[in-house]
Every structure is written in structure tokens, then in C-alpha cells.
Image: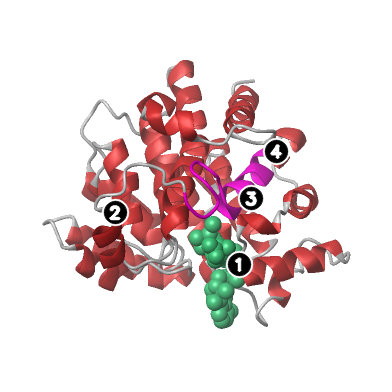
């Protein structure tokens, strides 16, 4: 692939995680109808809750992954766990299971054992899928490594098999989007078929949801049906497939894909962030509307910092 295009896609998938997170943050927990009634189609970042363009735990943890991959030139579980702990800011709105895992890590529990002590056997929340974009990018050309590293990174906080599979699937969607050319029409059915093939035997739940996606792509379903069949809550199985569908059903329309994901309600920042990661990987940074970029927070670890990390990841990949 043209190196400039690849760089644009690396930046796109990380930066648009932030975009989707910030677009969905103001309405996280609202249902689909309430969002429609209050805001219509949400295409602007509202200045409520944490403030327009502010990111939440989704992006903060993604930054931890990107920092660690760059610093260690690949995956290092101990380093990554340390960065999650160091970056943790409770004001960003973390899930209870992740807060528990981070506190176990802070107490000195080994990075590979904290996750399984949460909820007695591991969380099935979407916390390890929402942050995975840098792994999808860094291993975009190595699906076996991508699966292994996505699972190991999940295990730091989310040891449940649903989460490992969800994180691997979301990373694979990012990788497939990087490998796809947005100037050609996306073969939607074969995109999903490849994902079904990628899912391991332990991921039957995801295979079934991906099959739903294949059916939903044959017509224009109403949002209630999409939510009913794919889900919109904060568990990995009820949000990763929803993000994949939001991207594929709007693959030609970057802005529409993220806005649609948020419009489904429920875990809007996270489904927005995961859809954004895939759409950003497909269209690249150059596809992001300038008015969205302008409003993203840009402090010490904001938009500019995320972009710099993505560039460093790309440079490492290009060595
Ligand atoms: N935490 C939030 N949003 C609420 C706060 C928003 C804000 N402060 C406000 O008020 O405006 N969002 C973030 O959390 C989600 C990711 O969660 P994560 O990191 O996976 O956490 P957790 O707690 O591990 O899992 C989420 C919930 O799933 C249920 N659950 C998971 N595993 C379970 C198990 N084994 N048994 C029973 N229940 C399980 C629990 O209800 C967990 O709390 C994202 O939305 C992110 O944006
Ligand atoms: Mg969040
Ligand atoms: Mg969320």
C-alpha cells in the first residue's frame, strides 16, 4: 500500500476512536427514541456532561495501548498494564470492573492475573474492545499475531472469553478496513464472511451475530430491529457486532456511520468509538470532517498527541 495512505489510515483509526467517543459521550445511556426526540440526527458534539469534544475512558485506554506499543516496539503486557494504571482518570467515566482490575494491578497483582479476578472469572464488558484500534493497526498485516495480542491485551482487565474474542474481532475489523481501498465499492457480504471465518470456535455468539449482520445488509432495517438483533449495551457481544454493522451499512459515508452508531442509543460513546475506529481505518484521517477535528480536546494527551502516537506506530511498521 502507498505509505502515505497507510499513515493516513493509522491516524484515522486512532483519531476517530476519539471522534466517536466524544460524539457519543453526551448521550451515553439514552435510548434511541430519546436521542431522536431531543437531538434528531446527532452530527455535532454537544457541550454537555464532560464538554464538547472531551473524550472518556474509551480513548484514554486506547492512548495507553498506543503509548505502550510505541515505547516497547510491540506488545508488552506489563508495560501496557502499567500505562492503564498511570493514565487512569476517574473523571473519564470508567466501568466498575475495569476500576477493580486497575486497583488490583496497582496493588501489585501480575498483569496476567488481575483480569480474571474481576466479577469472579472476568468481565464481559466492552472495555477491552473499545480501546483496541492501535493493535488492529499495528498488526493489520498479521492476523495470527493480531488475534494473540488482542486477546492478551484484553486479559489485562477483561479475562472473559467473550471479551478476548470481541477485542480480536474488533481489531480484525480495523485491520480489514486498513486493507480495503475506499475508492472501490466495499464488498459488504465478503467483509462479513471473512469475519465469520476469523471468529474462533469459542466465539459462536459472534458468529451468530455476524450472520444477523449479513441478513440486515440485504435491506434497510429500522433501528429497533438492529438494536433487537445486535444489541446496544456495554457488554462486548452486544456492542462489537453493532459497531461492525454501523460501519458496513454506511461504509461510503464516514460521517453517517459514526452518527448512525450513536443514534442507536445505549452505550453510545463506545459503539461510536468502535465504529469510528473501523471507519477511520477505512477512510483515513483525510475523511474526517474538519468541524469534528476542530472541536476535539487538544491538551497534553489530546488530538495532537494521539496523532503523534499513530505516526510513530506507522513509522515503526515502516522500518
Ligand atoms: N462507565 C461507563 N459509563 C457510565 C458512566 C458515565 C459517566 N460517568 C456519566 O455518568 O455520565 N462507560 C464506560 O464503561 C463501559 C466499559 O465498561 P468496562 O470497562 O468493560 O467495565 P466493566 O465494569 O468490566 O463492564 C461493564 C458492565 O458490564 C456488566 N458485566 C461485565 N462483566 C460481567 C460479569 N462477569 N457478570 C456480571 N456483569 C458483568 C456490569 O454491569 C459492568 O459494569 C463503556 O461503556 C465505557 O464507555
Ligand atoms: Mg466511555
Ligand atoms: Mg461507553
Seen in the image, is 311 located left or right of residue 239? right
Along the line of sight, the residue nearer the viewer: 302 or 15 = 302
Label 3 CB sits under 8 Å from any ligand 1 atom: yes
Mark closer to the chain start, 1 or 3: 3
What residue is pinned by disc 2? 39
- Residues at marks 1 and 3 touching, judged by CB atoms closer than 8 Å: no
What residue is pinned by disc 1? 95
Where residue 138 appears, as percent x and y from the top left, is 57, 36
What residue is pinned by disc 3? 61
Where residue 30 appears, as percent x and y from the top left, is 38, 66
What residue is pinned by disc 4? 67
Residue stretch rendered in magenta on the structure? 48-67
Which element carries disc 1, helix, strand or loop?
A: loop
Along the line of sight, the residue nearer the viewer: 72 or 250 = 250
Mark closer to the chain start, 1 or 4: 4
The span from disc 1 to disc 3 (Cα, nearest Å) is 12 Å
Residue 243: image quadrant is bottom left
Q: Is residue 204 magenta?
A: no
Residue shown at 77%/55% (left/top)?
85
Residue 234 visible at all:
yes
Where residue 237 appears, as percent x and y from the top left, is 43, 68
Quadrant of the rendering where the N terminus is positioned: top left
Quadrant of the rendering where the C terminus is positioned: top right
Where residue 131 appears, as percent x and y from the top left, is 57, 51
Which element carries disc 3, helix, strand or loop?
A: helix
Disc 3 crowd, CA 10 A, few/some/many (<14, 14-19, 20+)? many
Name, please, the residue furthest toward the left: 219
Quarter of the render that holds ligand 1: bottom right
Disc 2 crowd, CA 10 A, few/some/many (<14, 14-19, 20+)? some
Amino acid at each position: 500500500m502507498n505509505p502515505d495512505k497507510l499513515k493516513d489510515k493509522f491516524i484515522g483509526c486512532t483519531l476517530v476512536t476519539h471522534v466517536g467517543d466524544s460524539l457519543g459521550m453526551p448521550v451515553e445511556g439514552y435510548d434511541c427514541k430519546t436521542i431522536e426526540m431531543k437531538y434528531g440526527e446527532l452530527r455535532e458534539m454537544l457541550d454537555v456532561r464532560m464538554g464538547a469534544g472531551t473524550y472518556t475512558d474509551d480513548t484514554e485506554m486506547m492512548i495507553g495501548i498506543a503509548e505502550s506499543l510505541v515505547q516497547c516496539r510491540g506488545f508488552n503486557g506489563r508495560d501496557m498494564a502499567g500505562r492503564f494504571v498511570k493514565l487512569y482518570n476517574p473523571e473519564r467515566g470508567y466501568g466498575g470492573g475495569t476500576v477493580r482490575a486497575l486497583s488490583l494491578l496497582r496493588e501489585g497483582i501480575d498483569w496476567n492475573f488481575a483480569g480474571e479476578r474481576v466479577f469472579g472469572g472476568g468481565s464481559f464488558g466492552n472495555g477491552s474492545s473499545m480501546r483496541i484500534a492501535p493493535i488492529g493497526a499495528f498488526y493489520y498485516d498479521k492476523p495470527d499475531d493480531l488475534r494473540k495480542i488482542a486477546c492478551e491485551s484484553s486479559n489485562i482487565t477483561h479475562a472473559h472469553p467473550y471479551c478476548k474474542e470481541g477485542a480480536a474481532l474488533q481489531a480484525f475489523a480495523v485491520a480489514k478496513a486498513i486493507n480495503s481501498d475506499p475508492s472501490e465499492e466495499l464488498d459488504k457480504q465478503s467483509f462479513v464472511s471473512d469475519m465469520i471465518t476469523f471468529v474462533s470456535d469459542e466465539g459462536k455468539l459472534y458468529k451468530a451475530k455476524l450472520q444477523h449482520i449479513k441478513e440486515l445488509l440485504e435491506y434497510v432495517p429500522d433501528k429497533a430491529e438492529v438494536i433487537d438483533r445486535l444489541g446496544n449495551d456495554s457488554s462486548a457481544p452486544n456492542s462489537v457486532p453493532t459497531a461492525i454493522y454501523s460501519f458496513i451499512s454506511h461504509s461510503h459515508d464516514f460521517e453517517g456511520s459514526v452518527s448512525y452508531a450513536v443514534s442507536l442509543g445505549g452505550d453510545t460513546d463506545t459503539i461510536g468509538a468502535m465504529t469510528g475506529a473501523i471507519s477511520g481505518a477505512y477512510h483515513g484521517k483525510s475523511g474526517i470532517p474538519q468541524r469534528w477535528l476542530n472541536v476535539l480536546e487538544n491538551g497534553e494527551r489530546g488530538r495532537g498527541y494521539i496523532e503523534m502516537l499513530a505516526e510513530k506506530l506507522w513509522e515503526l511498521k515502516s522500518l
